Amino acid sequence: MDVPWLLVAHGSVTALVVVSFLCGQWPIFEGTFVQSINHFLTSGAYRHFLRLVQAACGTGARDLVLGVEQYCCDRPNPILQVFYVAIIGGTYFIIVQSSFKYIPGYYVSVLHRYLSIVVVSIGAILFVLTSFSDPGTVTSENVSQYVSAYPFDNIIYVEKECSTCKITRPARAKHCRICDRCVARFDHHCGWMNNCIGEKNTCYFVAFLFWHFLLCLYGATILGFIVVGELKDKKVVYILTVYYGIDNSFSGLFPHIAQWLLAVHNTQILLVVFLGIIALLLGGFCAYHVHLCLSNMTTNETFKWQDYIFWMKKENAAKASAYTLKASINAASSEVQKSPPSKWKTFFSRSKTRAEEPVVKNNIYDVGWIRNLCEVMVPLSERRSFSCKKSE
């Protein structure tokens, strides 16, 4: 009876760590232990680790760790790519070794032995396309075409030169410090792909996220059907209720079925939990990027607009405060020459304050979700009009 509670405790701790790591900076968790866990996971643990290394092994070891960090975070490297291949290959190998012997089963046909190979292969192809395709590198040869294709909005993008590439940086482009190149319609640098996500490979990246979300969902579902089929095939519920006298209810059967599953099919249960968590994370990330594609935004532009709106609100608030202060001074100087107002009038009167001007996000690149989606599927640099501009 202790095993189900151990599983619940393990799942609760895992969920708390995942939520704290991904969502700890959200305003709703401000000042809570979730924010504290996020701070510890993202920065505090690493600082304590550096102090421990320096105290135990000296400054040389600490510098070595910092050098490894610089290589992993500030330079192109295949570490996460190898990790991805290991996760996909290792998980599929474990599924084949532990679960294919139950296929065909009560609910799962033999077709899934071969369908699983197809869906994993498609995921690998999308990974290769995203990792090794050109994200839309801006060079001196094509910079004029990119400048014509993406106009400056003079809000978050103004015409200026890239200090590294020494060419005009087109609107929506950014110089990636890791890849050391300017990328058109820059979204972000993805360590898992060891590549930037930009104009030419955003469609591959979103397809990769969506397909791997379906892949994890498919794997968790098939494994779940395998386990349920084994329950049905072995007549576990019938044996528990008839031969052991267990009450035929959820509260009566659940502890015993959970013990049987963890004893006989613990690998499948752990795989279902693992694939379910990954599917939730990939689903949320994919939904976010689909929203960006439909509104013709990038992750980089999201942060730019956040900074712009933040500073504009501060500027408008300062203007409103200055206007209110000036109005109060003028009112005070004019009231000196007049008779003092009645107490009732003073009590019910309201101070005249200037309302803050609303900050509007004017995304000139949003041309409707259909055309936005077409721009992601067929990038501007791949169209004939872009080539015509080049010939001109």
Image (cartoon, rainbow, N blue to C red):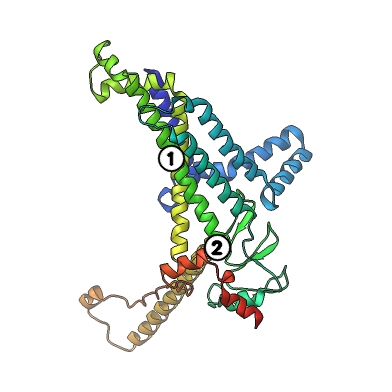
Tag 2: Cα neighbours inside 10 Å, few (<14), some, or many (≥20)? some
Q: Is residue 367 above or below residue 209?
A: below
Q: Earlier in the sequence, mark 1 or mark 2?
A: 1
Q: Badge 1 is on which residue?
A: 218
- Amino acid type, callout 2: Asn
Q: How many marks?
A: 2
The tag on residue 300 is 2
The tag on residue 208 is none
Observer able to see residue 104: yes
- Amino acid type, callout 1: Tyr
Task: Report how far apart the C-alphas of labels 1 and 2 lie in the structure.
Answer: 32 Å
Tag 1: Cα neighbours inside 10 Å, few (<14), some, or many (≥20)? some
Which of 285/49 is in front? Answer: 285
Q: Nearer the viewer, mark 1 or mark 2?
A: 1
Which of 3/319 is in front? Answer: 3
Residue for point 47% across, 61% down: 292
Q: Is residue 373 above or below residue 100?
A: below
Residue farthest to the bottom? 337
Which of 219/305 is in front? Answer: 219
Query: Residue 371's quadrant in the figure?
Result: bottom left
Q: Position of residue 72 (x, y in %)?
A: 68, 47
Q: Position of residue 305 (x, y in %)?
A: 50, 67
